[in-house]
Image (cartoon, rainbow, N blue to C red):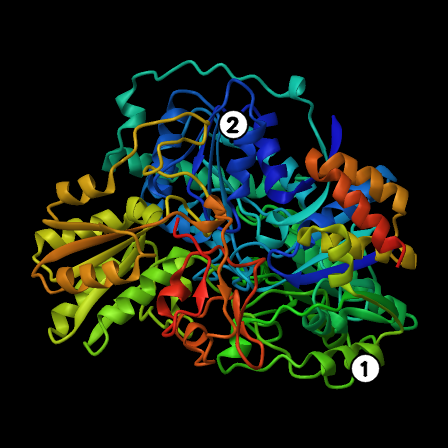
Amino acid sequence: MSDVILCGVGGQGTVLAAKLIARAAMNAELPVTCAETIGMAQRGGSVFSHVRLDRADASPLIAHGFADLIIGLEPAETVRQLSFLRADGSVVVSARPVIPVSATVGGPPYNLPEIMAYLQDNVAQLVVVDIDAALRKLANPKVQNVVLLGAAAQTGALGVTLDELRKAIHEIVPKRFIDVNLRALEFGASL
Amino acid sequence: MHPEFLMGNEAIALGALAAGVGVACGYPGTPSTEVLETVASRRGKGTYVEWSVNEKAAMELAAGASYAGARTLVTCKQVGLNVAADPLMSLAYVGVKGGMVVVVADDPGPISSQTEQDTRSFAQFAKLPVFDPSTPAEAYAMVIEAFSLSERIGSPVIVRPTTRVDHGYGIVEVADEHEWIQINAEGFVRDPSRWVIFPRLSCINHAAIEGRNAELTKEQSSSPFNRFETGKGRVGIVTQGVSFSYVMDALAHLSETTTEFKRPPVLKIGTPFPFPESLALSFLEGLDEIICIEELDPFLEHSLAELIGRHHLSVRVLGKLTGDVAPSGENTVESLTDLLARLLSVDPPRLPALPQAPQLPIRPPVLCAGCPHRASFYAVKRAMAGQKCVFCGDIGCYTLGNAAPLEMVDTCLCMGAGITIAQGISRVDSSVTTLSFVGDSTLFASGITGIINAVYNESRLTVCVLDNSTTAMTGHQVHPGIGRTLMGGTTEKVDIEALLHGAGVKTVKTVDPLDLAATVETLREVVALPGVKAIIFRSPCVVVARPTAHSVVDKAKCIACKRCIETIGCPAISFDGDKAHIDETQCTGCTLCEQICPVGAISGGVRP
């Protein structure tokens, strides 16, 4: 059993990452449900997907304090979702912030050092991914979701294996992007 | 049969296809949109599918197809049902021949809607049976059952999922295509005593409908969609939809943390109207109290309170009406865990306590980087600076023009209303200049009626048509102005200029909103004219057009005045502490910021 939350900002690819986990689970014949943000909130807003593996009749949303793993594509969004994590849960987070317009036009500011320190202090198993370095190497800014998925699989908390994820990439991702996504997965797993 | 991992809306579509749907139509609206898109992408040769201009058109089209014997599907969101209320209320009296299922997606929260209205209540008002699924798999089964019920009773039947079911994914066993039911529609058979509504026919049919619903009240007690799980104690829970799974999770959490937890019996209602009375009565046996857990209206609570009163039972009903359950908003597992712990007098689970989190940035939804609506709003703002104006907005991505720093939406009510509300405001206050913003899809859906009203009644009004050649907010659906249909074919484009001229608008100008100076000049000239006039701001949605250029800031020239940040609010532009910075992964090179920079420090974009 595994309850996983993916979070980030609209357009970062949480939906595809959630679909890959679900496909991998289906291939492993595990029951799986998923819920995600769709609609107005997608336009630059905070987005999340909840993926629940191997729980028959689970509700589509995970309760606060019950997630095994958070895959955070954005640091502030990860803090926003942190109350969902179990006390002994894991977090895999990208170190790159996405600073909203509101923070530059008088809204609450974005204090990255404070946010990263909060994660360091309050997460039992934290993996911080230097996504800029990863993307330079992979030469594609769109695959940070799969890099994080690779890193998450490596923690053991994801509930599906790297092999199952590789197979899911072959089945779901459009042909011309399969190779870069496979490389992103391996890169994430090697961190 | 085979398993698929499906979104609830996809499951609904596949259910309709398995049931042999011949005509499917609707108007996009979150959270319903994917149903019709999936019918379009998965349909066989025998199914016709269209995005109609609005929900009323869709409902009437489906009614005609059903008179002719086809199985039909209409999809919309809850506020879309209001638009289609006129045909549906009468159709409930006239009835149908081919099975007709109306899928109406409700939106507790609301997450992307104007209202928290409850289609179960609407179904009761219209006297139509309604199904309320709790999972994608149940939604699939309910749609198939709804078609068969509709045909059996000769009436439209409603299936009412909510957002978390529409957009939740699960594994669903679905029929293979060769297993889909084949319907051969016999065509329209003339029978004025059946298809022409008159007061006398309505009176006869009204009585028949009430009799039928009384019968269904008995029948639905044995429906597999209504069931109860036995439990301990004299307090029971009655619930529905996605809240059923939240209740199950909440009870599991409470039983983990409470020793000797008495798990209460739970009744789940999947067919709220007509209400399965005998099943509810047997559930109530031996109970002193029931807790009604549902989203939106206290529908089950009302039904049960009435049933208990009619049968002189001594059972307390706790819910929204008694103030024990929140009257609005979504349920969650945690809200129900707390609620049930309180009402069942047990300790709630202790959650890990986190220290106060640092202040986080807020991310209200914003217009995309490069969105032509931003340029349109900014041009109007600049052109109208210093004048007393009211900006009447409408439903679509461009509602987001309300946000700082643009702040260009003073009113927003419902589809098409911006045009008519502006007329009302200027009737009362002649000192203001009123401008209405309407999207291309919204103009066709219901804006055009307001324009005809303005011309006929001699209003003074400027209509700003924001034409991005798509229905953007709901995920880029086709509409009459594009020249393509949901079936994938090309078709005649309805020409917006000609349409407005035909409605009697004498001045219709078309501008490229990304050409700021020219747009401002056109605005100044057109707004000053008397009567009704229109400006079409034409530039494609960037999510569809995907321009590949991007602008860069020459840091040596940038004087850090922040005008590019503080006037247009583009999400690609930020301040790096010293100078303006443009995120190249977001920027589309629309050049709006280049035209605003007072020192020419930004360049590199290409106006599409």
**Amino acid marked by disc 2:** Arg
Q: Position of residue B315 (x, y in %)?
A: 66, 67
**Amino acid marked by disc 1:** Ala
Left or right: where B316 falls relative to B440? right
Say which element carries label 2. Answer: helix
Q: Residue under circle 2?
A: B152
Q: Is residue B390 visible?
A: yes
Give the residue drawn at x 67%, y 52%. A142
The residue nearer to you, when weighing B483 against A139, is A139
Q: Closer to us: mark 2 or mark 1?
A: 1
Q: Residue under circle 1?
A: B353
Q: CA distance from mark 2 to mark 1?
A: 56 Å
Q: Quadrant of residue A152?
A: bottom right
Query: What is the crowding at mark 1: few (fewer than 14 residues within 10 Å), some, or many (at least 20)?
Result: few
Give the residue drawn at x 50%, y 69%. B554
Q: Earlier in the sequence, mark 2 or mark 1?
A: 2
The residue nearer to you, when weighing B61 against A172, is A172
Q: Is residue B261 visible?
A: no
Q: Position of residue A159 (x, y in %)?
A: 88, 52
Q: Quadrant of residue B9?
A: top right
Query: What is the crowding at mark 2: few (fewer than 14 residues within 10 Å), some, or many (at least 20)?
Result: few
Q: Quadrant of residue B295?
A: bottom right
